Image: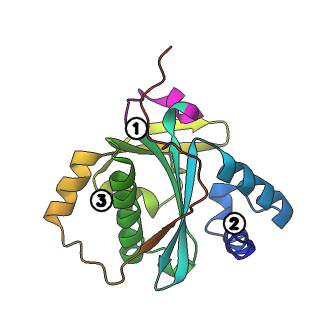
Amino acid sequence: MTGKDIDILHTWMQLPHIAPFWKLNVSRDRFAGYLDRTLNAENKRVFLVYVDDLPVAYLMAYSIFQDPVKDYYEAKSGDLGMHLLIGPREFLNKDDGLMLIRAMTAFLMKKYECGRIIGEPDVRNRIVIPILKRIGGERFGTITMPHKKAALMIGDRNRFYRYLLTKDVEFRKEPKLEDNTFWKAGAPCEKEPSN
């Protein structure tokens, strides 16, 4: 990831529609340290999402079995965790937000061949939660984590693809997800570790 990428993400973390949820509105040096740890974690993969060469979103896929969220629901083999944010405020609306979240979900489903995608957006998130429901995600209650009260969202692969079959999925602007090429081998969507 380049210094320019770090600057973009750091700027987004200061925005009023992101800072309360991500809590990473810290100095650039501190944020760069957080990002370095994230990029070097074996259980996480990070992507920047572009529309017409404009960076618009940040996507993180992570192993459920190496994350505390596994303690809040019955994790299954093939589950994949997802964090996302939409940077520029003008893309955070029901139309562009739907396009981006649908594209990110389809990308992760295809790339990692996961059965389910698990998310835990802050319960105050009035845009992402309805979009996740609209594309087939189900809310499995509210969970209280150390850093937030979250909606436990589970997106089943079959429900998502049924949704795609019933909707016009033509994009006004085709999102491009850049896969950083410096990742270690292994995918975050994995089988449950055996004891």
Q: Which residue is mark 2?
A: 13
Q: Secondary structure at mark 1?
A: strand
| Gap between marks 2 and 1 measured at Cα | 27 Å
Residue 27 visible (yes or no):
no
Instruction: Tell me the kind of residue under disc 2.
Output: Met
Q: Which residues are magenta?
A: 66-79
Check residue 77 for magenta coloring: yes
Q: What residue do we see at 67% from left, 69% from top?
A: 9
Is 6 placed left or right of 116 in the picture?
Answer: right
Q: Secondary structure at mark 3?
A: helix
Residue 50 visible (yes or no):
yes
Of callouts 2 and 1, which one flags the residue occurring earlier in the amino acid sequence? 2
Q: Position of residue 6 (x, y in %)?
A: 72, 69
Instruction: Tell me the kind of residue under disc 1.
Output: Asp
For discs 2 and 1, the disc positioned in front in the rendered view: 1
Give the image quarter of residue 149. top right
Q: How are the colours assigned in the image? A: rainbow
| Gap between marks 3 and 1 measured at Cα | 20 Å
Q: Nearer the viewer, residue 82 or 134?
A: 82
Check residue 58 for magenta coloring: no
Q: Is residue 48 above or below residue 38?
A: below
| Gap between marks 3 and 2 measured at Cα | 26 Å
Q: Which residue is mark 1?
A: 79
Instruction: Tell me the kind of residue under disc 3.
Output: Arg
Q: Which residue is mark 3?
A: 134
Of callouts 3 and 2, which one flags the residue occurring earlier in the amino acid sequence? 2
The residue most toward the left is 166
